[in-house]
Amino acid sequence: MNRKHWVVLTACCCLTLTALLTVAALLGWIPLFGSSRPRGGKPPGTVPTQLTAAAPPTQTTAQPLPTATADQVIAPGPLPFARVGVWEGRLAVYPPVGDVPERVFDVWLSSLPPAEQELLTRTIEVWDEGELARVLEDYTS
């Protein structure tokens, strides 16, 4: 192989590695920023016990799934800024993707009314920093 082939091969390897790391970060396999260890929680690599409860079955009418033609691409919906839910029985803030909370608060789920408990076990999606601050203020004050 000559020098030109090595340059092309190296560039392809770098692009492939970058793509794989990006996908892994978006899927929550590796943290995007900072440590993935929540305050007061377990060390990284341990799986939280129960993150969310299963939603009760509801009766809905079946909706057909969208299909794409050869010239269309179906993109996933936008990701929320963060998700507010429960981790080991306490209020927690999760990143848009992943099962490891970024922050855990000393607000026990059992101290909240049943309707709020159900809402948090299903997780609340927040779409900006202001909305996150308002939701957290409601539960922590």
Image (spheres, rainbow, N blue to C red):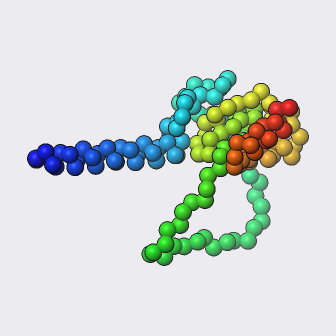
Q: Among all residues in the image, which is located at the extreme right?
A: 113
Residue 87 image point, x, y percent: 70, 35
What residue is drawn where x is 65% and y is 39%? 94
The image position of residue 7, as x and y in percent, is 20, 46
Outermost residue on the front side: it is 130
Identify the image quadrant of the C terminus: top right
Query: In this view of the protein, can residue 113 be seen by the observer?
Result: yes
Q: Nearer the viewer, residue 123 or 48?
A: 123
Residue, x 75% and y 67% (percent of image)? Answer: 60
The percent coordinates of residue 63 (x first, y second) are 67, 72
Would residue 134 be found to the left or right of residue 1 on screen? Answer: right
User: Image point 77% across, 65% down: which residue?
Assistant: 59
Is residue 83 among what the camera can see? no
Q: Position of residue 134 (x, y in %)?
A: 80, 41
* In-front residue for pair 22/108: 22
Q: Residue at x 49, y 42 (%)?
A: 25
